[in-house]
Image: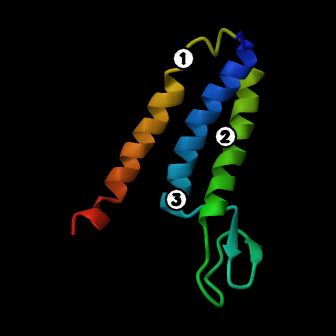
Amino acid sequence: MKTSRSFEIFAIVFAMVFALVYVVAVEQNYALFTYHPITYSLGWGVQAPADGPAMYWFGWMATAALAGGVSALVACRLPLGLTRFLRPALAWLVPLGVLLAFGYMLSSFFLR
Protein backbone atom coordinates (compact mmCIF):
# COMPACT_ATOMS: atom_id res chain seq x y z
CA MET A 1 0.00 0.00 0.00
CA LYS A 2 1.38 3.37 -1.02
CA THR A 3 0.84 6.36 1.27
CA SER A 4 1.24 10.00 0.43
CA ARG A 5 4.30 11.92 1.53
CA SER A 6 2.10 14.30 3.56
CA PHE A 7 0.73 11.44 5.65
CA GLU A 8 4.26 10.11 6.24
CA ILE A 9 5.42 13.53 7.40
CA PHE A 10 2.36 13.90 9.63
CA ALA A 11 2.85 10.49 11.23
CA ILE A 12 6.58 10.92 11.83
CA VAL A 13 6.32 14.43 13.28
CA PHE A 14 3.27 13.54 15.40
CA ALA A 15 5.02 10.51 16.91
CA MET A 16 8.15 12.49 17.73
CA VAL A 17 6.48 15.61 19.11
CA PHE A 18 3.80 13.69 21.03
CA ALA A 19 6.45 11.63 22.84
CA LEU A 20 8.67 14.60 23.63
CA VAL A 21 5.84 16.84 24.81
CA TYR A 22 4.34 14.02 26.87
CA VAL A 23 7.53 13.51 28.88
CA VAL A 24 7.80 17.28 29.48
CA ALA A 25 4.10 17.49 30.42
CA VAL A 26 4.49 14.69 32.97
CA GLU A 27 7.71 16.07 34.43
CA GLN A 28 6.46 19.68 34.68
CA ASN A 29 2.75 18.80 35.22
CA TYR A 30 1.41 20.64 32.17
CA ALA A 31 -2.06 19.12 32.08
CA LEU A 32 -4.64 20.65 29.74
CA PHE A 33 -7.32 19.61 32.23
CA THR A 34 -7.74 17.69 35.49
CA TYR A 35 -10.27 14.91 36.04
CA HIS A 36 -11.79 14.43 39.50
CA PRO A 37 -13.15 10.85 39.52
CA ILE A 38 -15.09 11.08 42.78
CA THR A 39 -17.20 14.01 41.57
CA TYR A 40 -17.04 13.06 37.85
CA SER A 41 -15.90 16.56 36.96
CA LEU A 42 -13.31 18.13 34.69
CA GLY A 43 -11.46 21.34 35.36
CA TRP A 44 -9.24 23.31 33.02
CA GLY A 45 -5.53 23.28 33.79
CA VAL A 46 -3.86 21.72 36.80
CA GLN A 47 -6.15 21.73 39.82
CA ALA A 48 -5.58 20.56 43.36
CA PRO A 49 -7.32 17.34 44.45
CA ALA A 50 -10.88 17.96 45.62
CA ASP A 51 -12.89 15.30 47.49
CA GLY A 52 -10.41 12.60 46.51
CA PRO A 53 -7.57 12.15 44.05
CA ALA A 54 -7.08 14.25 40.94
CA MET A 55 -6.14 12.54 37.69
CA TYR A 56 -3.74 14.46 35.47
CA TRP A 57 -2.94 11.67 33.01
CA PHE A 58 -5.82 12.55 30.67
CA GLY A 59 -4.70 16.18 30.63
CA TRP A 60 -1.09 15.21 29.89
CA MET A 61 -2.27 13.07 26.97
CA ALA A 62 -4.44 15.90 25.63
CA THR A 63 -1.57 18.38 25.94
CA ALA A 64 0.77 16.08 24.03
CA ALA A 65 -1.86 15.25 21.39
CA LEU A 66 -2.63 18.93 20.80
CA ALA A 67 1.04 19.85 20.46
CA GLY A 68 1.75 16.83 18.27
CA GLY A 69 -1.22 17.49 16.00
CA VAL A 70 -0.45 21.17 15.51
CA SER A 71 3.24 20.47 14.89
CA ALA A 72 2.45 17.70 12.42
CA LEU A 73 -0.01 19.88 10.51
CA VAL A 74 2.56 22.66 10.29
CA ALA A 75 5.19 20.17 9.10
CA CYS A 76 2.85 18.96 6.34
CA ARG A 77 2.70 22.50 4.97
CA LEU A 78 6.50 22.84 4.77
CA PRO A 79 8.25 22.38 1.42
CA LEU A 80 9.49 18.85 0.75
CA GLY A 81 13.08 20.10 0.75
CA LEU A 82 12.81 20.98 4.44
CA THR A 83 11.29 17.62 5.40
CA ARG A 84 13.58 15.30 3.46
CA PHE A 85 15.56 14.44 6.61
CA LEU A 86 12.45 12.95 8.28
CA ARG A 87 12.85 9.19 8.15
CA PRO A 88 10.32 6.64 9.44
CA ALA A 89 12.93 5.37 11.91
CA LEU A 90 12.55 8.64 13.84
CA ALA A 91 8.95 7.69 14.64
CA TRP A 92 10.40 4.76 16.61
CA LEU A 93 13.69 6.13 17.92
CA VAL A 94 12.35 9.25 19.63
CA PRO A 95 9.57 7.42 21.56
CA LEU A 96 12.11 4.74 22.49
CA GLY A 97 14.36 7.46 23.90
CA VAL A 98 11.40 8.87 25.83
CA LEU A 99 10.68 5.39 27.19
CA LEU A 100 14.27 5.21 28.46
CA ALA A 101 13.89 8.69 29.98
CA PHE A 102 10.76 7.53 31.83
CA GLY A 103 12.66 4.46 33.03
CA TYR A 104 15.33 6.73 34.46
CA MET A 105 12.77 9.13 35.99
CA LEU A 106 10.93 6.26 37.69
CA SER A 107 14.00 4.25 38.71
CA SER A 108 13.81 5.55 42.27
CA PHE A 109 10.45 3.76 42.70
CA PHE A 110 11.95 0.42 41.68
CA LEU A 111 15.39 0.64 43.29
CA ARG A 112 14.41 1.18 46.92
Q: In terms of secondary structure, where does tag 2 sit?
A: helix
Amino acid type at circle 1 is Arg
Front residue of this view, candidates 101 and 37: 37
Please determine whether, in this image, residue 75 is positioned above or below residue 39.
Answer: above
- The image quadrant that residue 80 belongs to is top right
Residue to which mark 3 is pinned: 26
Front residue of this view, candidates 94 and 24: 94
**What is the distance, in whole Å, between disc 2 and disc 1 at their CAs?**
17 Å
Q: Position of residue 39 (x, y in %)?
A: 74, 84
Please determine whether, in this image, residue 7 is positioned above or below residue 79.
Answer: below
Q: Residue at x 62, y 29 (%)?
A: 13
How many numbered badges does the structure rendering display?
3
Q: Residue at x 47, y 33 (%)?
A: 94
Residue to which mark 1 is pinned: 87
Q: Position of residue 52 (x, y in %)?
A: 61, 87
Q: Quadrant of the N terminus?
A: top right
Its colouring scheme is: rainbow
Q: Counting residues from the N terminus, which is met first, the one under dot 1 or under dot 3?
A: 3
Q: Residue at x 49, y 21 (%)?
A: 89
Q: In terms of secondary structure, where does tag 1 sit?
A: loop
As drawn, the label of residue 68 is: 2
Q: Residue at x 41, y 38 (%)?
A: 97
Amino acid type at circle 2 is Gly
Instruction: Report the side of 62 relative to 97 (left or right).
Output: right
